[in-house]
């Protein structure tokens, strides 16, 4: 097995993420009920079902096309905050991936960084604002450290997933500054962020693809 | 959950179908979930597009018509529409003079409209955006998501819609819209939670003797809970934080008391009577009044007060004819 | 009881004070509890007076204005006004051409208006009366109190109000009013009971999975209980008994779907979509539509459907301008 | 003590009736909740408070004036069905009483008959329609029987009160044909009529004045 992503592996990642979100849907919505508007689970379910359908209907020719199809599906089917955020993340990964047929550890790291940049540019959240950024930022950092040492991919992704989970747990004591939870002010403290929770599932699923 | 619905996941499309059946003045694209005027405005006029989650009716679909919006995009219940809807609407209503997007300040709404505006610009359509953020219950800050856009949105759509009808260009309409957005302040209170059809149960539980103070329009809990109080005390809780935040003693004010969906008119009028007394005591001149359920939160029982500073120009646009299902006066 | 009120016994007067504050087009006599137009109609025109218990807002006070009523008398919550109020209103609005009393068929309303009409006649004022009785849930019979007056009252006040504005005389207005009253049929359903402020608790208990079919507008139980059903089945329950009672397949029909006070617009539109489908299937031509909460039952959640046979004359009066707080279109 | 009504005795009757209704107010409203709109108690209380105030503010000169003041107060302050019905009853009694200072057994009987006629004319209820007529009609009949035998007043009024109570009890199995209860159809069966209940209190109080 080559130590790089290709379209079939990306597809495995996507369907795995869809399954994980399907399973965690109630939990995501429950988290969003406490500090938001009780729809993060159904939003992500709707979007990922559409994304999986899109890539299986017209299998993308390269990694860039794959990410763009996923990104557009999320943008066009989710709505709310998570649609543009996850959508931008995948669209930017697609820009960096371009027409590449495979993404080795270095290039995939650049894709992740571009996705994170897009997410932050779109949502303008700082670390500590109690958002999905608090899971993704440490995940990308951890990935980069392992990648700087030359990999392998499974180690980089596993480190990323662990860092994401830690970041997710770290959102609980935070007072939200972005998204709907911010309207609650101090009432948002003590609740785990739903977006950081789904973001952690994304990295955990990625690690499993190479495990 | 006791509602007049069939399948909870079909509520938005079925309600739009009912709107289409009830109003020949509208054309409803049920696939894209966009409400248009049946008779588009003439070439060379700026078009107004708004939208947001469903469950706030008559906003926004009910405000499509002469003197107000050209199109309204309906998202899922309490979920902002996607860029595809907004882009489709923007393209459809552009008459060559540009399109103004009227967006309530919620992360999702802002981002989805932003993406649609980028796509429309790529298609050569001039798009400007105004974001309403009038809810004083939320502390304003550049480091946060900022205030929610609530009641002033209705007033803005009316005022800027009238100006657009008269042939004003995009730049001056945008300036007018910003002026309205900046001059408005709102505060809301809920006696009961609403129920999102897909969720099937009330978003929060509120005991018989409690109310939520500082709510938005998405059935979310407010800033704090308080014991249920008589109407005159509640009126005080609405007026005070607004006046603490902005001065309305200079010039004229438009007062808008809004019902949240399940509040009967007899209670709204009673509340308005209490509000009017306080405003008069504070030396505020209410030049125009709107009382009714225009921006709702499904079947929530509650109300919100919006005050808007209005000069003669704003009042003139306010008084201008409007002909929509939700707001209608003049010729 | 969660309501925006102060003292339960002061609700009616305080709500009227709020109405007065909100609408400069109205003049409200808070002592007699009568809502008048601020600018009375010219001499020589027939005046229209209606009224009833409070808790049905916007009916009737919200229908005072050009093209509709000249005065509305507000009784206690769900209690008809007393003859003194009606007499005062009748005297005040008479322009020398007589006064038409529009009365919903309830024993109390009929008798109080009757006494007022006798007293007005003794004062030399020509008074004619029309009684609405359109509710098909109640069996019609000369040996009983007969059917309740419900939704058709709103349509009648609009149509006859327009004709009165045009200068028609009392005799022809009375004939027109009778024609409207006879051509209308209504049926209602409730999902929850309302709460009378003075009583402090819901008038009846209704389990989560039940609804009341065949209700009026006074929070009373209906003719029977049924399991809660999807919207398309409820639409059937509204349409069927109306069509069993009268034929609407000839000529045009005005369809009016009314909310009972706590029903949000998204549900009303969804219901109207279902009703419209059935009417189309039955070959009924809906020429005009009204969807909204115009005749409420405090904070009851529910709706009623009214169908009215309408010829060209009726449609012309329906389309004529009206300018009241509750209903407003045209010039 | 003379065997006839005069203004002080009529006043005693009225205040006694007011007290009885005050005490039975909850019961009257409860009866009206079951088959009407839950206001008969508060309607009657409001009206009788106004009537007592009116006659004490400007004490009527004769029996006719007394009845007219009471009737007008009820008409002007009750609303609903019971206002015009009780109001008409007293107004018609006033017409027959005229300027009489006292009402002996015969004349008072004529007053009652006129009141009943007015009530029936106004409300158009038949016996058996489950209304206050079902208490008043037998009461007037019973009074007349004793009066035809020459009295005394207390016997006539006691017989009337007993007949009213019997009539009131008889309303329970009836299906309502008049008033709000008629909208309930068969659902009205098994409930005692609120108006017949207050009417019985009127006759019971009258009997007590002469007891
Ligand atoms: N400005 C932002 N930047 C990054 N993430 C954000 C931002 N605003 C919200 N989020 C994320 O979005 C999640 C909520 O998504 P979702 O419930 O689907 O959308 P909505 O808030 O519109 O209902 C939050 O838990 C948070 O992680
Ligand atoms: N047509 C009628 N004739 C005689 N009595 C009537 C008639 N209609 C109603 N009533 C009486 O009025 C009583 C109800 O009075 P009330 O509750 O005060 O008025 P409303 O029905 O207007 O609320 C009934 O219990 C019945 O005895
Ligand atoms: Mg959410
Ligand atoms: Mg949402
Ligand atoms: Mg009543
Ligand atoms: Mg009653």
Image (spheres, coloured by chain):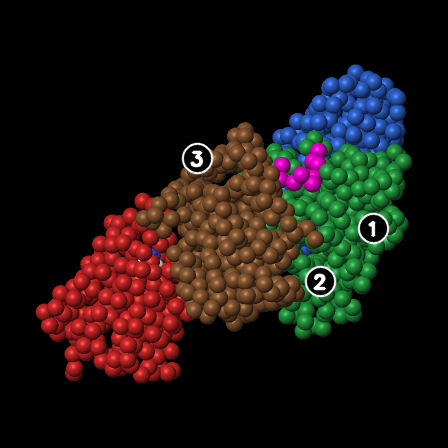
Chain colours: A red, B brown, C green, D blue
Q: Dot 2: within a 10 Å radius of its alpha carbon, few (fewer than 14), some, or many (20 or more) residues? A: some
Q: Secondary structure at mark 3?
A: helix
Q: Are marks 3 and 1 in contact (CB under 8 Å)?
A: no
Residue at coordinates 33% horizontally, 81% vertically from top-left?
A60
Percent x, y for residue B42? 62, 64
Q: Residue A75 sits in which quadrant?
A: bottom left
Rendered view: C29 above or below B39: above
Q: CA distance from mark 3 to mark 1?
A: 50 Å
Q: Does any portion of residue B58 appear in the rendered image?
A: no
Q: CA distance from mark 3 to mark 2?
A: 47 Å
Q: Residue furthest left?
A: A149
**Dot 2 falls on which chain?**
C
Q: Residue furthest top?
A: D1
Q: Residue C122 sits in which quadrant?
A: top right
Nearer the observer, disc 3 or disc 2? Answer: 3
Tell me which segment is drawn in magenta: C21-29
Disc 1 under 8 Å from ligand 2? The reply is no
Q: Secondary structure at mark 2?
A: strand
Residue A4 highlighted magenta (yes or no): no
Residue denoted by label 3: B244
Q: Are marks 2 and 1 in contact (CB under 8 Å)?
A: no
Which is nearer the eye, A16 or C114?
A: A16
Percent x, y for residue A207? 20, 71
Residue denoted by label 2: C288
Residue denoted by label 1: C166
Which is nearer the eye, D17 or A181?
A: A181
Q: Residue B225 sits in which quadrant?
A: top left
Tell if the residue under mark 2 belongs to the same chain as the one under mark 1: yes
């Amino acid at each position: 097995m080559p130590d790089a992503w290709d379209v079939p592996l990306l597809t495995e990642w996507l369907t795995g993420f869809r399954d994980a979100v399907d399973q965690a849907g109630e939990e995501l919505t429950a988290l969003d009920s406490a500090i938001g508007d009780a729809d993060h689970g159904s939003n992500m379910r709707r979007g990922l079902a559409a994304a999986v359908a899109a890539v299986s209907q017209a299998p993308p020719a390269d990694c860039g096309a794959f990410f763009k199809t996923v990104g557009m599906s999320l943008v066009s089917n989710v709505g709310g905050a998570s649609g543009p955020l996850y959508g931008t993340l995948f669209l930017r990964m697609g820009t960096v991936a371009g027409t590449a047929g495979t993404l080795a550890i270095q290039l995939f790291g650049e894709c992740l960084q571009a996705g994170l940049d897009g997410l932050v540019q779109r949502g303008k959240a700082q670390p500590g604002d109690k958002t999905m950024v608090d899971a993704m930022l440490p995940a990308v950092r951890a990935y980069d450290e392992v990648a700087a040492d030359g990999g392998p991919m499974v180690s980089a992704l596993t480190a990323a997933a662990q860092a994401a989970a830690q970041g997710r747990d770290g959102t609980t004591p935070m007072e939200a500054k972005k998204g709907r939870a911010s309207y609650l002010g101090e009432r948002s403290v003590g609740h785990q962020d739903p977006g950081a929770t789904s973001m952690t599932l994304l990295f955990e699923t990625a690690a499993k693809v190479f495990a | 959950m006791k509602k007049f619905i069939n399948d909870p996941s079909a509520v938005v499309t079925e309600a739009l179908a009912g709107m289409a059946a009830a109003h020949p003045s509208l054309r409803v694209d049920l696939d894209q979930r966009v409400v248009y005027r049946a008779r588009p405005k003439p070439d060379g006029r700026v078009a107004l597009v708004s939208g947001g989650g469903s469950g706030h009716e008559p906003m926004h679909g009910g405000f499509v018509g002469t003197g107000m919006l050209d199109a309204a995009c309906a998202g899922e219940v309490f979920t902002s529409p996607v860029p595809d809807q907004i882009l489709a609407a923007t393209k459809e209503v552009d008459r060559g003079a540009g399109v103004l997007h009227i967006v309530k300040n919620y992360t999702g709404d802002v981002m989805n409209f932003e993406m649609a505006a980028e796509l429309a610009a790529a298609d050569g359509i001039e798009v400007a955006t105004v974001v309403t953020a009038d809810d004083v219950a939320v502390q304003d800050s550049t480091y946060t998501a900022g205030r929610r856009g609530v009641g002033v949105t209705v007033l803005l759509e009316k005022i800027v819609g009238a100006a657009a009808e008269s042939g004003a260009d995009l730049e001056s309409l945008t300036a007018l819209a910003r002026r309205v957005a900046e001059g408005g302040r709102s505060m809301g209170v809920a006696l009961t939670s609403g129920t999102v059809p897909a969720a099937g149960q009330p978003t929060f539980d509120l005991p018989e003797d409690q109310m939520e103070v500082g709510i938005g329009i998405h059935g979310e809990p407010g800033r704090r809970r308080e014991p249920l109080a008589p109407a005159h005390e509640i009126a005080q809780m609405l007026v005070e934080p607004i006046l603490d935040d902005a001065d309305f003693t200079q010039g004229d004010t438009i007062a808008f008391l809004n019902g949240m969906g399940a509040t009967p008119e007899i209670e709204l009028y009673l509340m308005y009577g209490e509000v009017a007394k306080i405003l008069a005591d504070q030396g505020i001149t209410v030049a125009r009044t709107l009382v009714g359920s225009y921006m709702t939160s499904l079947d929530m029982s509650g109300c919100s007060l919006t005050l808007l500073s209005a000069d003669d120009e704003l009042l003139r646009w306010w008084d201008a004819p409007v002909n929509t299902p939700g707001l209608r006066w003049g010729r």
